[in-house]
Amino acid sequence: MPGVISVWGWKGLAVIYCVTPELRAKFKEPFGLLLAGTFSETMTKLKSIVKKEKPPVIVSVGDTVSRNLHSHNLRPNLSVTDNQSMRRRVKPSTFEDKKIVHVKNPQGTITEEAFAAVQKALEKSDENHVHVVVDGEEDLLTLVAVLYAPEGSFVVYGQPYQGIIVVKVTPEKRAEAKALLNAMSVRKAK
């Protein structure tokens, strides 16, 4: 993990990153290319981009995005979900042929456990398909996916009321992800 000191936080979990108030607004901005439209429209656009660019790995972060990618035969190598959509509980997603990994990751944080699960899943992303199910919140794990997915990969997440965001993994995007992680604070143990 890039220069991080862990502390023990929520229910004994090692929280390694925590969103600061200054970063909250930054995280509402798209981190990649916005594909605006309905689910059907955004999936059609994404299929076209995938066909053209042939990313080595596709990562989906979020329940609705993950379900849509699977239902449109864009099988992500890694899906990260938390059984919530727009802060409301949703029916848990199940995807065929996926190894399921359960982690805890409180809202606004990245735990050591969640970080390691995403990193490990992406190390062998060409060999298997993994579904990381988060107890808490999965949003910030997008940054970890950008850090560890192979260059040229796509990390896809939802942008509420607008569409989906496609982050193409490049050295520049990795540097941005690392800078955002380094700008976070570490939650103090209670």
Image (cartoon, rainbow, N blue to C red):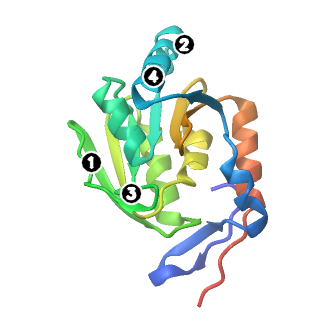
Above or below residue 58? Residue 19 is: below
Q: Amino acid at mark 4?
A: Glu
Image position, residue 173 (x, y; %): 71, 35
Q: Amino acid at mark 2?
A: Glu
Q: Residue furthest bottom?
A: 190
Q: Which mark lies nearer to you, 4 or 3?
A: 4
Q: Amino acid at mark 1?
A: Ser
- Residues 149 and 184: in front is 184
Badge 4 vs badge 3, beta-carbon distance below 8 Å: no
Q: Name the residue at 70% across, 61% down.
A: 24
Report whether 143 appears left or right of 77.
right
Mark 4 or mark 2: name the one nearer the start of the chain. 4
The Cα atoms of the two marked residues, 3 and 1, are separated by 9 Å
Q: Which mark lies nearer to you, 2 or 3?
A: 3
- Residues 93 and 126: in front is 93
Q: Residues within 10 Å of mark 1 (few under 14, many from 20)?
A: some
The Cα atoms of the two marked residues, 1 and 4, are separated by 22 Å
Q: Amino acid at mark 3?
A: Asp
Helix, strand or loop at disc 3?
loop
- According to the image, label 3 marks what residue? 82
Helix, strand or loop at disc 4?
helix
Q: Name the residue at 32% across, 34% down.
A: 128
The quadrant holding residue 41 is top left
- According to the image, label 2 marks what residue? 53
Q: Name the residue at 46% across, 36% down.
A: 59
Mark 2 or mark 3: name the one nearer the start of the chain. 2
Q: Residue furthest left?
A: 96
The Cα atoms of the two marked residues, 1 and 2, are separated by 28 Å
- According to the image, label 1 marks what residue? 93
Q: Residue furthest top?
A: 52
Above or below residue 137? Residue 38 is: above
The Cα atoms of the two marked residues, 2 and 3, are separated by 29 Å
